[in-house]
Image (cartoon, helix red, strand yellow):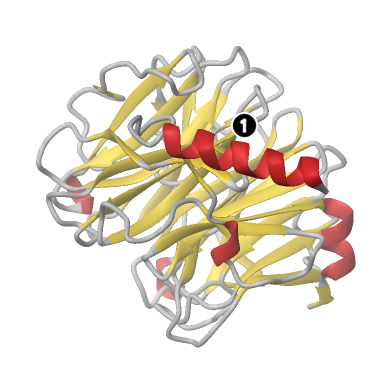
Amino acid sequence: MCSKWVAFFCICILSACSGGQQQSERINNDTDMPAGDSSFVKGYFFTTPAPFAECHASTILHLQNGEFMAAWFGGQKEGTDDVGIWLVKGKPGNWTNPVEVAKIREDAHWNPVLFQAPEGRVFLYFKVGKKIPSWETWVKMSDDNGQTWSEAVELVKGDKGGRGPVRNKPIVTSGGLWIAGASHEEGNWDAFADISADQGKTWTAAPYIALNRNEFKGKGVIQPTLWESAPGKVHMLLRSSEGAIYRSDSEDGGKTWSAGSKSGLPNPNSGIDLTKLPDGTLVLAYNPDTANWGSRSPLSLAISFDNGVTWPKILDIDSGDKEDEFSYPAVISYGDTIAVSYTWNRKNIAYWIGAKDALIKAAKDR
């Protein structure tokens, strides 16, 4: 017991001594998260008060060195000119303080997306612009797991409206293509796959996902999340304005796509994300409400064992009142472990980590 107390005080002294270096200072936030199933790890990425009034639209990455990296946009309010991209690194209970990693001009920054290429380079994609329909996609790169970053450059020079990943991580197909879920929001909402055959240097936009506009009361579909089930067979689920998640499929590696159709899952016009585990199990993070601009509580994980045809299991990972917001999840997997980051009432960014078997055991029938 004595040795444990000695170790505790050593940790406290080391933590106090590192306070002058913002990028290396570590903070423990897990005690602030309400207790839940002990099979899962839950917490926040930072303590409040934060250097921004609101935060939203997180992204999470499990680095090849075993650490996590997470980013989001933060500022006075979504869309205000002061909003920038903020980033942390570390492991549960031991996170760096948030640092503003991207702020290229005094326009709002939006929707960061972290992605680590197979060879190890980390990409940080994000949007910049006063209005969503005319925003641009920018990218920064790091070859040392986020210790240093390149200058930001436009992903597709001169583009307005957004190319590359709009909110969710790209995938690397069995054929080596990078495919990003992209969308445009000028007038009608339209989604498409953006494809790179040269490790992200150049991008080719596939046609918009066809929709039967006669069935749509709202604007359309945006923010695809992607997976590959077999060589050449790529699939996407999409946020929609119709109270439902939509789906589209490609048989030729993402070049052409089927018309969008309802997947059988609800969607309150809020962000979704999905990950595929090594055995083919799909885990989808979403808000299970059917009203357009409906409730973003609870935040749930749905599980599919048949490539997204059915979703028989569901687990709420955060819940509260209907007015609460647990939204815009990013979900990744490494081995059989799933990690989720998400907006927590616009005041913090939370995370949830759990193993596949524990998730299936805790989940309920839909």
User: Residue 53: x, y in percent?
Assistant: 25, 61
Q: Residue at position x 72%, y 55% from top?
A: 283
Please, is residue 257 above or below residue 203 in the view? below
**Location of residue 162 in the rendering, given as x and y in whole percent from the top left corner:** 29, 40
Q: In which quadrant of the rendered image does the C terminus lie?
A: bottom right
> Residue drawn 41% across and 71% down?
345
Whether residue 165 can be seen here? no
Q: Quadrant of residue 311?
A: bottom right
- Whether 197 is drawn above or below 290: the answer is above
Q: Say whether residue 21 is left or right of residue 152.
A: right
The residue closer to the viewer here, 100 or 217, is 100
Which residue bears the numbered disc 1? 67
Q: Is residue 56 left or right of residue 103?
A: right
**Element type at mark 1:** loop
Residue 173 on image: x %, y %? 66, 26
Task: Report the front residue among 208 and 163.
Answer: 163
Residue placed at 86% from the left, 59% from the top?
358
Looking at the image, which residue is at 83% across and 52% down?
Answer: 356
